[in-house]
Image (cartoon, rainbow, N blue to C red):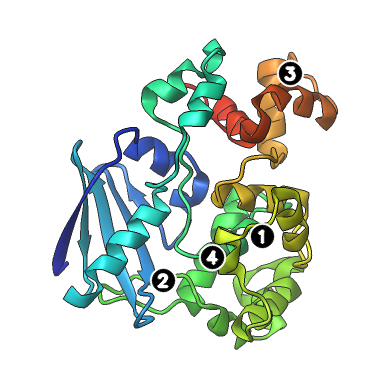
Amino acid sequence: MSNQINIPRPKKFSFLDTVNGHGWSDLLPFYFDEGTGRLHYVFRIEKSGKPVAANIKDDGKTIIIETDCADTDIDDVAQTVRHIMRFDDDLDDFYSTIKKDDAFAWVQKASAGRLLRSHTVFEDLVKTMCTTNCSWALTKNMTTNLVEKLGEPAANGKRAFPTPEALANVSVDFFRDEIRAGYRSPYFAELAEAVAGGKLDLESWLVSDLPTAELKKEMKKVKGIGDYAADNLLKLLGRYDGLALDSWLRAGFYKKHNREKACADKKIEKHYKKFGKWRGLAIWCDMAGDRS
């Protein structure tokens, strides 16, 4: 790595809870080395489009980034790390909302609540589509195939997530046979073509002024995106109105709050209603459990 970048860490921030607070650290081009405490990631520089690798660690006071980027790209790398680690998310209102509930005391104590995200909304959206209606093992397999078969390598040989253009240049059969994407194959092809062709600007969702309900409607216009996927992606945009219920969250709720018996989603929704616009983050922290 040719450069080292030091970024002051936010006051209310937990590196490990951010890395482990969301399954993305288990999906390429992320890789978390528990032995060294380093988060590895490969992403593209905005200006040049070149992939660069970064090793990210926390020394308790500073976030240290070791990277193979050029000197002219240091600011871009620093900003990308701020983005994926959610440095600028203000969770004070969330902490105030959960303050009276003893079950969430660990969250504020640990400065938890940030959910790791990718460099682009496109990457997050495709990964979210890879989580629908399948096991986590299959999700990992699909994302690994996407990165290894279509991603461009950085200087260290590790590959970035493929661009919309790279996905648009392969066939539906390629997604089905090589990526093992199953029913998602035509959805990937259509999404990639729309983004690469400029018909769909996913990155604008990060700064959209639309109310959450309206933005969710826009998301659901993308084939393969239903309520769960839209709510999950909204969390990565900093909007936590939706619960993003999946089999893991439902099973956790049944075990923790319903004597291990299945129940209607309405009961789960009622349980977290008191958390208002933070209910999606509240259920995630509740099911993740006390890691303090």
Q: Are marks 1 and 2 in contact (CB under 8 Å)?
A: no
Ranked by sequence position, the earlier of labels 4 and 2 is: 4
Q: Nearer the viewer, residue 62 or 125?
A: 62
The nearer-to-camera label among 1 and 4 is 4
Residue 67 in the image, given as x and y percentages of width and height: 22, 65
Q: Quadrant of residue 176?
A: bottom right
Residue 46 in the image, given as x and y percentages of width and height: 38, 75
Ranked by sequence position, the earlier of labels 3 and 1 is: 1
Q: Is label 2 in a helix, a strand or a loop?
A: loop
Residue position for label 2:
160
Residue position for label 4:
123
Q: Is label 3 in a helix, a strand or a loop?
A: loop
Distance between mark 3 and mark 1 Cα atoms: 28 Å
Ranked by sequence position, the earlier of labels 2 and 3 is: 2
The nearer-to-camera label among 4 and 2 is 4
Residue type at mark 4: give it.
Glu
Q: Is label 1 in a helix, a strand or a loop?
A: helix
The residue positioned 74% from the left and 52% from the top of the image is 133
Above or below, 70 against 181 in this view is below
Q: Is label 4 in a helix, a strand or a loop?
A: helix
Above or below, 68 against 60 in this view is below
The residue positioned 35% from the left and 74% from the top of the image is 45
The nearer-to-camera label among 3 and 1 is 1
Residue type at mark 1: give it.
Met
Distance between mark 4 and mark 3 Cα atoms: 35 Å
